[in-house]
Image (cartoon, rainbow, N blue to C red):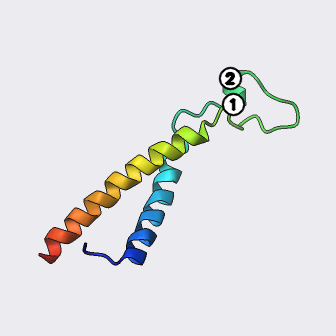
């Protein structure tokens, strides 16, 4: 393993949050686009954000990116 455990955890969490902010806008429909504006809310608020699905996709993508980084670091240091 090219990284220590605490460094690996830190890199994974940073990668996870970067991927999360890239994944969040996918498939979002605003209230104004759907025509279902709830009174007292912003018309740009999402109708169904599907955060659990996005968190799962974020974890899968971040794990793949982290694995690629580990493989890259292993072969660069070899």
Residue occupied by mark 2: 34
Is mark 1 in CB contact (under 8 Å) with mark 2? yes
Residue at 76% x, 34% y: name it.
Answer: 43
Q: Position of residue 4 (x, y in %)?
A: 34, 78
Residue 68 - label: none
Residue occupied by mark 1: 47
Instruction: Mark 1 vs mark 2: give the one in front.
Output: 1
Residue at 53% x, 52% y: name it.
Answer: 21
Q: Position of residue 64 (x, y in %)?
A: 32, 52
Residue 11 sits above or below residue 37 on the image: below
Residue 60 sits above or below residue 9 on the image: above
Q: Between residues 1 and 38, which one lies in front from this camera angle?
A: 1
Residue at 40% x, 54% y: name it.
Answer: 62
Please report whichever mark, 1 or 2, sits nearer to the chain's N-terminal start. Answer: 2
Residue 43 sits above or below residue 3 on the image: above
Residue at 71% x, 37% y: name it.
Answer: 44
Q: Position of residue 2 (x, y in %)?
A: 25, 75
Q: Between residues 59 and 23, which one lies in front from this camera angle?
A: 59
Tell me if 67 is positioned left or right of 36 in this view: left
Q: Spatial distance from mark 1 to mark 2, Cα to Cα?
A: 7 Å
Tell me if 37 is positioned left or right of 66 in this view: right
């Amino acid at each position: 393993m090219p990284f220590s455990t605490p460094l690996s955890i830190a890199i994974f969490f940073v990668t996870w949050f970067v991927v999360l902010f890239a994944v969040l806008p996918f498939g979002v429909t605003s209230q104004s686009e759907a025509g279902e504006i709830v009174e007292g809310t912003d018309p740009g608020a999402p109708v169904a954000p599907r955060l659990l699905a996005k968190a799962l996709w974020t974890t899968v993508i971040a794990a793949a990116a982290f694995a690629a980084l580990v493989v890259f670091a292993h072969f660069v240091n070899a």
